[in-house]
Amino acid sequence: MKILNLKTVFPSANSAFSYYYQIFNSDHGALQNVQDTKALFNVGFYINEPWQNEIIASHRNWSKEYAEAEWQWYLSGDASTDKLGEIYGKVPPIWEKMSTGPNNFVNSNYGYQWERAHQLDKVVQQLKDDPTTRKAALSIYDGKEIHIYRKDTPCTYAIQFTILNNELNMSVYMRSNDLWFGFCNDQYCFSELQKVVAERLSIEIGWYYHHAHNFHLYERHLLNENKEDGMLQKRANSYE
C-alpha cells in the first residue's frame, strides 16, 4: 500500500486546489490510473479559512458567477434544473444529462437533500440545544435509494457540524470528488452553507475539513506541454 504523505492543512480553497493539481500532474507514488482519471484514495485536508472560497488559479478560469448560481439553486431547495436556468440564465449540459422526469428533477441538488425531512433546521436546533452534540449531521447519499441513482448519484455522503471554542466547524465526506469541477464548485457551496449555519447560531466560523474516498482529476484536465494554457481555460468554460 502506498502511503499518501500529502499536505493536509491549507489556508484557502485555492491553495488546496493548486497543491492537489500539481500532485495529480506529478509522479506521486500514491496516484492510481482509474478509468480515465488519475486518482488518490482517502484524501482528507483542512481549510482553515473557508470563507476564502474563490479559486483564483489562472489556468482554471473558475467562474464565481456560476458557483454562486449553483449555491442559490441549492439554497432554494428546488431540485428542478428549470430553477437553475432561471437563476443563471441557462442550464449547463452536465445538469441536463442528470435531470429526469417532466419537472427536470435532479437528485444531486444538495439543497433539496438537506431540506428533506427538514434536516438543516434539525441540525441547527440540535446545535442550539446542545453545542457539544455529535449528532448534527446532514445525510445526502443514501444506500437505501440506489434504485433512483441510475442517472444521478450524489457525490457527497454527509456533512457534519461541530462547535469548538464557540466556532462552527464543518466536515464534508464524499464518495467521489473531481478536483477540476467538483471540488471547486462544491467547496464554494459547502463553505457558504457553513456561513449560513454559523449565522443562524450567531457564532464565528472555524475550520472546514474535506474528505474524498476517491479524489481524482480527469486526464483531459492534466497539464500537457504540447497544448496552450488557453485550451485548458476553454475546457473549464464548457462546464460553466
Image (spheres, rainbow, N blue to C red):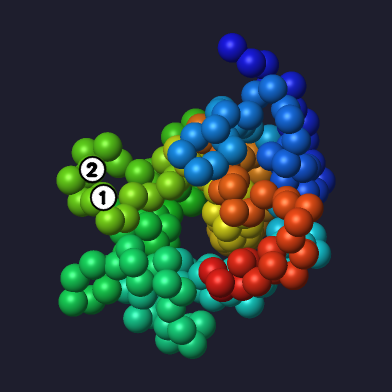
Instruction: Identify the residue position indicated by label 1 in the image.
Output: 149
* CA–CA distance in space, label 2 to label 1: 5 Å
The correct choice, above or below, for 6 with respect to 72 in the image is above
Which residue bears the numbered disc 2?
146
Say which quarter of the image contains residue 229.
bottom right
Q: Residues within 10 Å of mark 1 (few under 14, many from 20)?
A: some
* Tag 2–tag 1 contact (CB < 8 Å): yes
Task: Point out residue 139 in the picture as x, y percentages from the top left corner.
Answer: 38, 44
Which quarter of the figure is the N terminus placed in? top right
Q: Residue at x 18, y 46 (%)?
A: 147
Compared to residue 115, the image places residue 136 above or below, namely above
Residue at the spot 69% in from the left edge and 39% down from the top edge: 24
Give left or right: position of 84 versus 221.
Answer: left
Q: Count up the numbered dots.
A: 2
Figure quadrant of the C terminus? bottom right
Secondary structure at badge 1 equals loop
- Could you tell me residue 193's position as x and y percent? 56, 58
